[in-house]
Amino acid sequence: MSALVTLFDKTFEPFLPESLIQEKIKELAEEINKDYAGKKPLFIAILNGSFMFAADLFKAINIEAEICFIKLASYKGAKSTGNVITAIGLDNDINNRHVIILEDIIDTGKTLSQFLPQLEHQQPSSLKIAVLLHKPDATIHPVHIDYCCFSIPNRFVLGYGLDYDGFGRNLKEIYQLKESE
Ligand code: 5GP
Ligand code: MG
């Protein structure tokens, strides 16, 4: 595995090797292939972070399935109740569909816990969450996770689609912020 990576002011150390990431994604895909045979699921991948995970997972899906990509934009609501999340690019009708959300990482759970009710409102046949990474110790807003590749410690990670200030997404492995940082 590669050595340290430095981006701006931060140093990252190797954490999850490429082979392990690929192995876990294949396992997850096999589970989904079994669970969704004949259901023609619609995967909704949340950009930007999930693009590599979504691509590798979808390549290992061998049942009839669709995929679309959305971006979540957060803006301050009129009331002081916090931010409002809107989905950009969700053109597919999810009513009566089996939907699987693909997310890179669940940290506090804030993003998904705000967004999921909007999808539920459209009454999909089922709605499940598949994540590459989950930081259980960071949870503030609990989200039910149906499929997860890795539960990881509460430390900032980088690579395989995940960025630090826009950079580092192209790393094939996942790195974590160095202990001393
Ligand atoms: P949450 O709403 O669950 O707190 O976090 C959602 C988003 O924050 C993730 O989709 C991801 O874009 C970003 N995020 C959370 N933790 C990390 C991390 O350790 N590394 C990177 N690169 N992004 C993170
Ligand atoms: Mg994300």
Image (spheres, grey):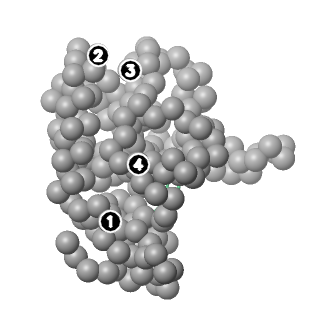
Q: Residue, x 32% and y 65% (percent of image)?
A: 15
**Secondary element type, mark 4:** strand
The answer to whether mark 4 and mark 2 are in CB contact below 8 A is no
Q: Amino acid at mark 4?
A: Ser
User: In the displayed structure, does residue 98 sit left or right of residue 84?
Assistant: left
Answer yes or no: is residue 73 visible: no
Q: Amino acid at mark 3?
A: His
Q: Which image quadrant for residue 70? A: top left
**Depicted 76 relative to depicted 167: above or below:** above
Q: Amino acid at mark 2?
A: Lys
Q: Which image quadrant for residue 119? A: top right
Pointer 3: what residue? 98
Pointer 2: what residue? 39
Pointer 1: what residue? 15
- As drawn, the label of residue 151 is 4
Q: Residue, x 80% and y 43% (percent of image)?
A: 81
Image coordinates for residue 61, horizontal then vertical, percent: 20, 33
Viewer-nearest of discs 1 and 3: 1
Q: Earlier in the sequence, mark 1 or mark 2?
A: 1
